[in-house]
Image (cartoon, rainbow, N blue to C red):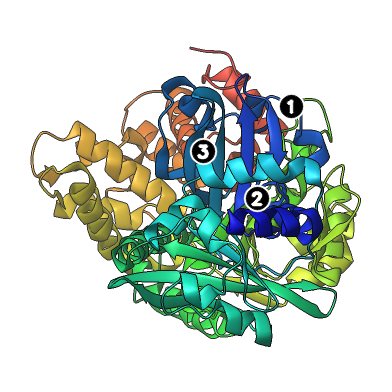
């Protein structure tokens, strides 16, 4: 009874303030709910971890604040749960949950949870009200926590029931005594004197090793006591948690490496096949450019492998560990290009993703942004791109602030930018900004000596991808391929080889497995362009009596158009450039020959 008298005397003074401040100063979140699931205790740590203000949580349904909370299960089962992991946003907390009883009846439940990603830090002012004393005692008693509070003299003012039992005493007997009389090997009185916290310390009680935290409690600059808590009741618990954390860290590292791999460059300079003088010179220029952080402009016809060079430059450069992000300016509608490049904020426009979306500039931060077909970028976007390159800042669509970006730009085009600048369709200032290190990728006809090597490399890769046996070229077919001018360059060659593999039943690819218009080059006739070659071949066939000149010319012209369209991926503007005719003229011929297409009549 003597101990009880001391308790009542102290509780009339500082204990009320201490109890309330203890709960609010805990690094652990504390939530208590009544029988109906309504929150009546919600401490500061819970507010911080859950991102909900304390005033907006008290009196609300628990599930409206924490939809995935397992605390409601305790109301249903009446059984305690310990060490339960629970996701809270981007964090993971470990929760202890316990039912609360009064007079044998279930009156609610309490959850004490801690963020396992950070060490606890506690240094809170002590202040409370007498109305919370009984409630807080019930919360701490029912939470299964092993904790103790001492005043500035090291006298125990509060201890949880389970911790008292572990120390072979009761709450009533422990309160009012010096900490050294209650807890074996304690240092609570030392922390209360020095004001220096002791985190993650090992303490042996009754031959059992525990991991404890000891935190000084301060009122302004004055130490008025200390709070102690058993973080792990056995060292084995700490080992298990450390093992789980190591496993989680390993998984995160693995996924980060996989993400870097997926978003990184897929090709290196070793992927660029060819030893001819033209392609070797281009590779050497690109390798030198890769050592710098300067903007590179890749020039070359469609299908020459500009993207392959962009990948290789990134993979060999100082930003190789960063992302490689690409965007084809011609493939994105003009009205969507800005949001693709700059991203947008939530609510920027109808259908905008919740939370907004980062643009290609932000995604490429620390790495490389590859803008293919930059010559097809609309003029308004050219001005915005120029600002990003000069200021190194991007503004999301619908945003109010700028974001810094640090990236390398590689651009590519098959168009004549100098001519476009003269016509006013490409900004001169942007041209000078991207044309820092221009690299010309030669067309296939300028390094035809590499054709067989390129073909063999592609057939080998195709065999590895499909699992089929590797094919080889017949000497007759190789002669034709070397004579053909390849207006679609390497892409056209790859498309033709893929078609030939699909059409060939045997191991050797022969001329009959390729389109008919290539057969006209069987005797090595080299021309400046596909239409010219077609006309010459038509005249030769007419002279030999293989049909009228008009019909043969028409057939040759139709085949050349089909080949150019295939090489340009169906893009008529590019196909017209390959054929060296006006786009309107190409439309007329497509209609005349009944070639199927996006806008042309079907045969």
Q: Residue at x 88, y 68 (%)?
A: 429
Q: Which mark is residue 594?
A: none
Q: Which residue is mark 2?
A: 49
Q: Going by the image, does 231 lie left or right of 589?
A: left
Of the image marks 2 and 3, the number of the one nearer the N terminus: 2
Q: Nearer the viewer, residue 32 or 250?
A: 32
Give coordinates of residue 475: x percent, y percent: 15, 55
Q: CA distance from mark 2 to mark 3?
A: 53 Å
Q: Is residue 252 above or below residue 602?
A: below
According to the image, label 3 marks what residue? 569
Q: Quadrant of residue 151?
A: bottom right
Numbered label attached to residue 60: 1
Cα–Cα gap, marks 2 and 1 = 17 Å
Q: Is residue 507 left or right of residue 374?
A: left
Q: Earlier in the sequence, mark 1 or mark 3?
A: 1
Give x and y (percent) for residue 527.
46, 54
């Amino acid at each position: 009874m003597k101990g009880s008298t001391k308790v009542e005397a102290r509780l009339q003074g500082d204990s009320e303030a201490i109890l309330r401040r203890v709960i609010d100063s805990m690094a652990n979140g504390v939530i208590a709910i009544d029988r109906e699931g309504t929150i009546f205790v919600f401490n500061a740590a819970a507010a911080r971890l859950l991102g909900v203000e304390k005033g907006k949580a008290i009196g609300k349904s628990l599930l409206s604040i924490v939809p995935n909370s397992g605390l409601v299960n305790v109301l249903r089962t009446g059984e305690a749960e310990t060490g339960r992991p629970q996701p809270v946003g981007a964090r993971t907390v470990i929760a202890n949950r316990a039912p609360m009883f009064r007079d044998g009846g279930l009156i609610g439940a309490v959850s004490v949870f801690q963020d396992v990603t950070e060490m606890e830090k506690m240094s809170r002012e002590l202040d409370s009200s007498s109305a919370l004393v009984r409630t807080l005692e019930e919360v701490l008693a029912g939470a299964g926590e092993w904790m103790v509070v001492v005043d500035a003299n090291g006298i125990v003012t509060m201890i949880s029931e389970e911790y008292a039992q572990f120390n072979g005493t009761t709450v009533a007997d422990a309160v009012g005594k010096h900490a050294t009389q209650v807890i074996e090997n304690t240092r609570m009185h030392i922390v209360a004197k020095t004001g220096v916290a002791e985190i993650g310390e090992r303490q042996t009680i009754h031959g059992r090793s525990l991991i404890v935290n000891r935190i000084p409690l301060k009122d302004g600059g004055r130490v008025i006591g200390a709070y102690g808590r058993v973080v792990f009741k056995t060292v084995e618990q700490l080992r298990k948690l450390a093992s789980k954390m190591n496993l989680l860290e390993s998984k995160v590292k693995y996924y980060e490496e996989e993400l870097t791999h997926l978003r990184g460059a897929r090709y290196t300079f070793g992927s660029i096949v060819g030893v001819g003088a033209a392609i070797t010179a281009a590779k050497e220029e690109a390798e030198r450019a890769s050592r710098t952080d300067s903007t590179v402009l890749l020039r070359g016809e469609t299908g020459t492998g500009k993207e392959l060079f962009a990948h290789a430059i990134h993979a060999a450069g100082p930003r190789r560990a960063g992302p490689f992000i690409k965007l084809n300016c011609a493939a994105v509608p003009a009205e969507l290009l800005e949001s693709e490049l700059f991203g947008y904020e939530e609510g920027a426009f109808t259908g905008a993703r919740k939370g907004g979306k980062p643009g290609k500039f932000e995604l490429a931060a620390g790495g490389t942004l590859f803008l293919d077909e930059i010559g097809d970028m609309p003029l308004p976007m050219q001005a915005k791109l120029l600002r990003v390159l000069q200021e190194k800042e991007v503004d999301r669509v619908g945003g109010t602030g700028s974001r810094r970006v640090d990236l390398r730009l590689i651009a590519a085009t098959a168009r004549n930018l100098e001519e476009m600048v003269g016509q006013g369709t490409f900004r001169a200032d942007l041209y000078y900004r991207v044309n820092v290190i221009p690299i010309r990728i030669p067309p296939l006809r300028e390094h035809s000596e590499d054709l067989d090597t390129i073909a063999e490399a592609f057939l080998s890769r195709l065999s590895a991808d499909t699992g089929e046996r590797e094919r080889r070229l017949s000497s007759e077919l190789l002669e034709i391929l070397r004579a053909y001018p390849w207006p679609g360059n390497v892409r056209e060659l790859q498309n033709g080889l893929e078609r030939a593999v699909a059409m060939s039943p045997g191991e050797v690819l022969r001329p009959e497995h390729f389109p008919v218009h290539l057969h006209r080059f069987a005797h090595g006739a080299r021309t400046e362009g596909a239409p010219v070659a077609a006309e010459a071949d038509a005249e030769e066939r007419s002279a030999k009596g293989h049909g009228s000149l008009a019909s043969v010319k028409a057939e040759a012209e139709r085949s050349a158009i089909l080949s150019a369209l295939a090489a340009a991926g169906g893009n008529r503007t590019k196909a017209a450039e390959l054929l060296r005719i006006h786009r309107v003229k190409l439309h007329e011929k497509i209609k005349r020959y009944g070639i199927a297409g996006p806008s042309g009549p079907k045969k």
